[in-house]
Amino acid sequence: MPESTSTRRITIDPITRLEGHGKIDIFLDDAGQVERAFFQVPELRGFEKFAQGRPAEDMPQITSRICGVCPTAHHMAATKALDNLYKVTPTPAGRKIRELVYSTFMAEDHALHFYFLGGPDFVVGPTAPAAERNVLGVIAKVGVEVGKKVIAMRRRLRELTSLAAGKAGHPVFGLPGGVAKRLTAADQVRFQTVAAEAVEFAQFTLGVFDDIVLKNSDYVNLILADFFTHRTHYMGLVDDKNQVNFYDGSLRVVSPEGAETVKFAPEKYLDYIAEHVEPWSYMKFCYLKSPGWKGFTEGAESGVYSVAPMARLNVADRMATPLAQQAYGKYIATLGKPVHHTLANHWARVIELLYAAERMQELANDPEIIDPNVRTIPTAVPTEGVGVVEAPRGTLIHHYQTDERGLITKANLIVATQNNAARIAMSVEKAAKGVLSGKQISEGLLNMVEMAFRAYDPCLGCATHSLPGSMPLEVRLRNRNGETLSTLRRP
Amino acid sequence: MPARVRVLGLGNEILADDAFGILAARELAKLFPPDEVEVIESSESGLHLLDHVTNVSRLVVIDSVQTGRVAPGTILEVREQDVRAVPGAAAHGTGLFDALALARKLGFPVPTEVVILAVEAADCLTLGGPMHPAVAAALPRLIDQAKALISKP
């Protein structure tokens, strides 16, 4: 960063429930051109210290409390880390029930995201006035009946998660070696019924995406816009046929050209992934050890990679279920492969919604799902365990080390937003450079910058549940001495 | 038959001052019979709160907040109509008010009165961290304030 005292800093700061959430700093040079832009999210502190000395078996319950958005993802990653810690393989029914619950959770989260979190940008429209870019704007666009359909679907999916996992907002069913509760024949029928509804709902949602987004050339041009495009590596879980899998498999990395560069067992993640630290941020930026950290740059020579729906579809050869595979074919035919357009995450998310629903249906129809043998009792002395799942927002890694009694001595988490941190920072800067110039900054332009990071759906801290969105957005123009030159407020 | 009054304690028990709403809800649950006042604790966010804000006539929400404009421990009483930009301009920031606005738009039964009692927090990001003394000290005051809101005719 140049030391020019006349460099101006613009801060976009959604003052939400916790001050400082998701801050964007944009530095302008003398000519009013964007020089650098930074995106920062606050991180929870003290996880390692908090975990130390606790019994490893408590981790699925404790870590699910870390985040009010994806408790099931943390619960599942922690449970899988316990399998690995105690060197125990879940029974077939135990494994299938876990994946069934996980697919149910993914379907719910993706549906909610598409309509109500990404929807204000993508369904309502990027150039719509700020006053319409909210859930009410989404309802105005898709209609009250569709709104009710989304809410009803979400409720039925959550009821099933609660049925199998204890509580949707705080699952308690995962144990090393399996699950705490079997499914009955009556439970199976409920899952079959809702799964069939979910498949239909997902197909309907693809239709909505088609009508609203793909039939509108302005949207398509925006997806393809250069300032929303980065040629980076991608990472995600695949099964033994290189198909997308949310629950288990190998981590596969592909280059910006789409070639597999490495595929590894999740326990080996430290051999392939490292974290880079920048003086201006307390965030850690994950990168691939090969080719290594080369700065915030694109291309095959850079270690920057990304996770989340678009990345998962990039690393896979195909989808594991027929309808999702069909949708995937159209997506690839339209955008090529790998897809480098950040906003394509929204489309990829809908395809994954369909996959989650179909996978749910497959598992619900599996006769073994009601087998009462749902747990293998662990007997090994614990030392170290790693568990990985694909959370809705990307690869989530839990890593624990324990003493011989199973008390945690060391714990590490890598959440999706850390995997994506470098690319998100690049996206914000590129979007800012692409759309901002001169000293006039409009709502619409700022929204384009925000869209660049919202497509990743970064977790802006893990505890936002109440007042976000209720406070205005502040944009501060500052000089390098920290003096505020002017303040803009969003209504 | 839904309760007439519901207390919704929001927060995260393991996240320093963010535990406030949960602890307050637990205290209030001891003071009223469950058929009169329904008490819910939740660590969830955004539209996940939808189920908790419908089918009740009076809703008292207890939470922590960081405005950075008042001292930690200050109790803010906010009504839905006092809040600007409802629902929020930030697409990711769907929260309580968005859940209420959405419920209303879709024709679900929503409370006629929504009051938020929020304590100004000092730290909501340290896992396992203790509550700030000023925030902890605000708990009895908040309970009194909540009792008055719950009991008024």
Image: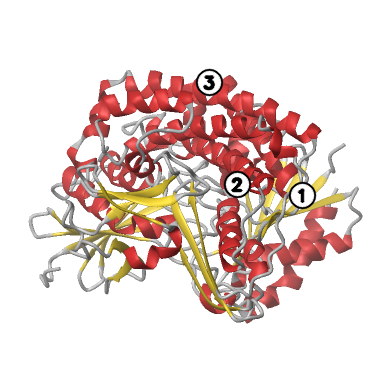
Chain that bears disc 2 = B
x and y percentages locating residue A469 in the rendered image? 49, 48
Classify mark 2: residues with Cα within 10 Å, few (<14), some (14-19) or many (20+).
many
Which label's residue is closer to the chain start, 3 or 1? 3
In percent of the image, x 81 and y 59: which residue is there?
B148
Residue A108 quadrant: top right
Which of the labelled discs sits on residue B126, or is there none? none
Identify the element where label 2 is drawn.
helix
Side of A263 relative to A482 (left or right): right
Chain that bears disc 1 = A
Kindly identify the amino acid type of the residue bearing the numbered disc 3. Answer: Gly
Q: Which residue is mark 1?
A: A181
Whether residue B82 is situated above or below residue B22 in the rendered picture? above
Q: Which residue is mark 3?
A: A143
Q: Is residue A295 visible?
A: yes
Looking at the picture, do discs 2 and 1 lie on one chain?
no
Q: Which residue is mark 2?
A: B96
Identify the element where label 1 is drawn.
loop
Kindly identify the amino acid type of the residue bearing the numbered disc 2. Answer: Leu
Separation of residues labelled 3 and 1 (CA atoms): 40 Å
Separation of residues labelled 2 and 1 (CA atoms): 33 Å
x and y percentages locating residue B2 in the rendered image? 84, 39
Kindly identify the amino acid type of the residue bearing the numbered disc 1. Answer: Lys
